[in-house]
Every structure is written in C-alpha cells, then in structure tokens.
Image (cartoon, rainbow, N blue to C red):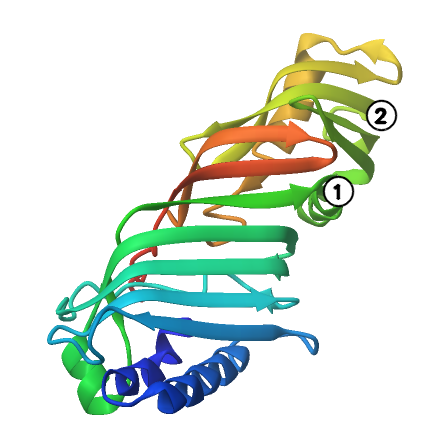
Amino acid sequence: MIPLVLGLFGALFYFGNSEIHRFENLAARDIRGTIRGADAKVSVRTELNGIIGGPLGDLKKVSICASNFETDGVPLFTQPELSKKGLIRDLHIELKEFTIAGLRIQELVSDIPECHFDYALAVSKRKIRLSQSGVGRGQVLIREKDLEAFILRKFGEIKRIRVRVANDRVHVEGYGEFLILKSNFAVDANLIAIDGTKLALSNATILLDGHPADDVSRKALLDTLNPVVDLARDLKLYDAIIVDQLVLRDGVIRAAGATRIPQQPSG
C-alpha cells in the first residue's frame, strides 16, 4: 500500500536537492513495488515550503503520478490515530491508463489540500503515515469500451453488450438471460450518481427484441444493471470520491466530485 512506501519522504526534511531527488526516486521505486503491471510507471515529486525541514515538516506539494498498472482498490488510506504535526499543503494525484478491480480507467486526477502526517515518525523512521485528509476536487474518465468490458465481467446475465456514450446519454445494446426472460435489449438512459458513489441508469427507454418493454420486464432489466458501477463496493474506493457531476460526451464518461484520502478500514 502506498502509505507503507512513502516513508522515504521523512529524509527530505534534512537533505539538499540531490538527496531530495534520490529519495523521490526511491519512493517511486517502492510505490512501483506495490502495484501490478510489467509496464507500470511511477514518479514522485516534492516541493518544500520555504526552508528545508521547516519546523512542522511543512511540504508545499507532493505529486504522485502513475500509469499502466493494476490494483484491487484505493491504494492510499489515512490513519487518524497518528500525530497530525506534519503537513502536505497540496497532495496531487495523477493516474493514467490503469485498472482498478476490473474497470479500466483512462485518467484520474485529484488535488487534495491540507493533508496531515505523523512528523515524528517521518523523522525517526523515515516513514510517512497520513493521519488526516482534507477535501479536494477530482475527476475520473471512463471510456465506453472499458465500461463494456466491466459490465460483461460484473453481470453474468449479460452475454453480449455494446455501450455508446454521447450527448449526456448512455445507449446500451446487448443480449441477456434474466430470471424471467431471455432477450435482445436496447436501453437509452441518463446516468446519475446515487449517494455520490453509485452510477445508475435513470429515465430509461427500453426495448426488448425491438418492442417497448412492459413494466415487469423493464424493472427486471434495470434491477439487474443498476448500479452499473458501485464505486465503494465494486472498486473499493470507499469515500475517496463523492461524485456530484457527470458529463457524457464523445464516448467518455467524466465523473467529477469531492475527493479525499479515505480512512483505513478496520480489520
């Protein structure tokens, strides 16, 4: 996990630029060791706030960039029981072309202010543990072809599917074998964010084998497909992003909202 590999930042408080770059490279290498993918790339950059090793471990900005990797869930947590003496004024996260819990993501970008860490632990053991997260803003981009692959993986009832995203609508065509019917289907719908974490089809027009669906069949299909993506359950993102804006254009779903580093789950 990333909080276990950011420990090298503690040394940044006491060394010059050459040491800073060396430790950034070591931190990036360790982060690379926590994710999967032969082509994975990771970089870490740090901007100090004023004099090196300010009295409270004051970091102006820490940027973590990674691409072409796989992970099973959110890779970074806070541990609120730890000291909050250290400060990262801006935690910038930029992830590209990665897969999380089976869903391919084109891009995830987030800036989170006022993140705190255990400064004493950083100094004594060269380990950074985040203890508190601010609330920032971020966005996730998902391509229609990647959503297709995810739906086939998630829903065993769906045997064939094609997804098209345009003009703030999503159009889904395919073949499914459900409890009460086996049918070709076509769905044209809005995509909404329920509770900020569940992406669901809404205001849908549904055809089954080319004919308008009756109420029972319509409910059965929507109950199967919704939520299309559950960010907390399917992707194990917890409350890392609470979506409040969805834009569907040119084959890409852009989900934006409040971002934070979630609290380490118990157990």
Q: Quadrant of the N terminus?
A: bottom left
Q: Quadrant of residue 53?
A: bottom left
Q: Which residue is mark 2?
A: 183
Q: Residues within 10 Å of mark 2 (few under 14, many from 20)?
A: some
Tell me: 241 left or right of 128: right
The amino acid type of the residue labelled 1 equals Glu
Question: Upstream in the sequence, badge 2 or badge 1?
Answer: 1
Residue 52 versus residue 176: which sits nearer the camera? 52
Determine the CA span between mark 2 and mark 1: 18 Å
Question: Looking at the image, can residue 263 be seen?
Answer: yes
- Residue 193 in percent (x, y) is at 49, 30
Q: Secondary structure at mark 2?
A: strand
Tell me: 175 left or right of 129: right
The amino acid type of the residue labelled 2 equals Ser
Residue 149 versus residue 91: which sits nearer the camera? 91
Tell me: 103 left or right of 22: right
- Residue 57 in percent (x, y) is at 18, 74
Q: Secondary structure at mark 1?
A: helix
Q: Quadrant of residue 185?
A: top right
* Point 54% across, 52% down: residue: 108
Q: Which residue is mark 1?
A: 148
* Point 42% across, 34% down: residue: 196
Q: Residues within 10 Å of mark 1 (few under 14, many from 20)?
A: some
16 versus 240 height, above or below: below
- Residue 212 in percent (x, y) is at 79, 8
* Point 54% across, 79% down: residue: 32
